[in-house]
Amino acid sequence: MDEKKGIISRQTDMSDVEIEEKLKEFEGDVEKVIKNYMCPEKKINKEPIQSKNQLRYKLIRDMMDKASKDYLKKE
């Protein structure tokens, strides 16, 4: 824990109390704490960003999977 606090304190000007709070908030991830310090307005998404093309193909795959399952149930 002291090593993580040292890394964050060298990269930012946060106090020890703030560092501890942020480490708890970001589950001990040093990189996320520093990124949040650099750009606090931006939320760090855990979900990957998908393009419109990826969403289209996902819908097609889901539809085809459902049709296949329905067909197998009828037999």
Image (tube, grey):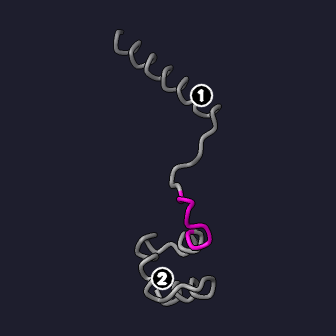
Q: Three-letter amino acid code at disc 2? A: Ile
Nearer-N-terminus badge (1/2): 2
Q: CA distance from mark 1 to mark 2?
A: 43 Å
Magenta span of residues: 36-44
> What's the residue at 56%, 48% (across, down)?
48
Q: Which residue is mark 2?
A: 19
Give the camera-side residue of 61 and 17: 17
* Residue 50 coordinates in the image, percent (x, y): 60, 41
* Residue 71 coordinates in the image, percent (x, y): 41, 12
How dense is the environment of label 2, judged by Cα within 10 Å: few (below 14), some, or many (20 and up)? many
Q: Which residue is mark 1?
A: 57
Q: Which label was assigned to residue 33?
A: none
Q: Main secondary structure of the magenta part?
A: loop
Which corner quadrant holds the C terminus? top left
> What's the residue at 43%, 82% (across, down)?
20
Asked if residue 24 is among those painted magenta in the image, a careful observer would answer no
Query: Considering the numbered disc 1 on the image, is that residue within a helix, a strand or a loop?
Result: helix
